[in-house]
Each structure stands twice: as structure tokens, then as C-alpha cells.
Amino acid sequence: MDKTKKAEIKESVNKALSQVLEHLKISQPSKKTTRVITKASKVLKKELKDILKKEDRKAAKQTKASKVKKEKGLTKVMKHAV
């Protein structure tokens, strides 16, 4: 996943999160309410980070696999040449 796509995803999640927080805003929220809201936002951000890491791992595996295949092909060619 490229950096621009990551940035877009993070931006959209942050925007959605801020909209939810605005919607939940109470004129004088209690400590319990603010605690729950901040905890929920932390959990959402952690989930987003995990998803992005998984995507990075998938992309890394794909590139790694193609590199290995190329190397194997080269070694086969070298063996035949020798």
C-alpha cells in the first residue's frame, strides 16, 4: 500500500472520528462520558494501525515472493550455463 493511500485512509478515519465526537458532544459531558469517548477513539486508531500493518505485510510478502521466484529462475539459468 502506498503512502498516499495510507494518508487518505487515516484522514478519512480521523474525519469520521471527529464527526462522531461532535455528534456525541454534550454541553457539559461527565468524566465518564469523556473517558468512554477517548477510549473508543484510541481503540479505533489502534484497529486502523493494525489494518494498515496487515496490508503492508501482504504487500511485502507479494514483493518478496516475486523476488524469490526471480532468483530461483536466475540460479536455474546459471546451472544450465555451467
Image: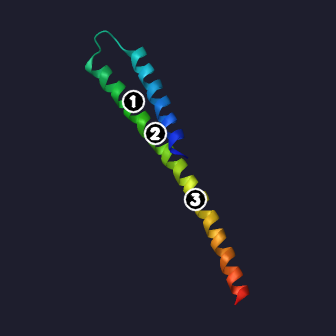
- Find residue 54 and report its horizontal and vertical position in percent: 52, 49
Q: Mark 3 or 1, which is nearer the eye?
A: 3
Residue 44: which quarter of the image? Answer: top left
Quadrant of residue 66 in the image?
A: bottom right
Q: Residue 22: which disc? A: none
Q: Amino acid at mark 2?
A: Glu
Residue name at image x 47 percent, y 44 percent: 50
Check if mark 2's residue and mark 3's residue have beta carbons within 8 Å: no
Which badge, 2 or 3, comes first in the chain's sequence? 2
- Residue 69 in the image: x percent, y percent? 66, 69
Residue nearer the viewer, 24 or 30: 24
User: Which quadrant of the rendered structure holds the C terminus?
Assistant: bottom right
Q: Residues within 10 Å of mark 1 (few under 14, many from 20)?
A: some
Colour convention: rainbow
Check contact, mark 2 vs mark 1: CB within 8 A. Answer: no
Q: Is residue 27 above or below residue 36?
A: above
Measure the alpha-carbon separation of dots 2 and 1.
11 Å
Q: Nearer the viewer, residue 23 or 63?
A: 63
Q: Gap in Å between the C-alphas at discs 2 and 3?
A: 21 Å
Vertical side of 62 occupied by 51: above or below: above
Point out which mark residue 47 bears. Answer: 2
Residue position for label 3: 61
Q: SS at mark 3?
A: helix
> Which residue is depicted at the point 43% across and 15% down?
23
Q: What is the secondary structure assignment of the residue under circle 1?
A: helix
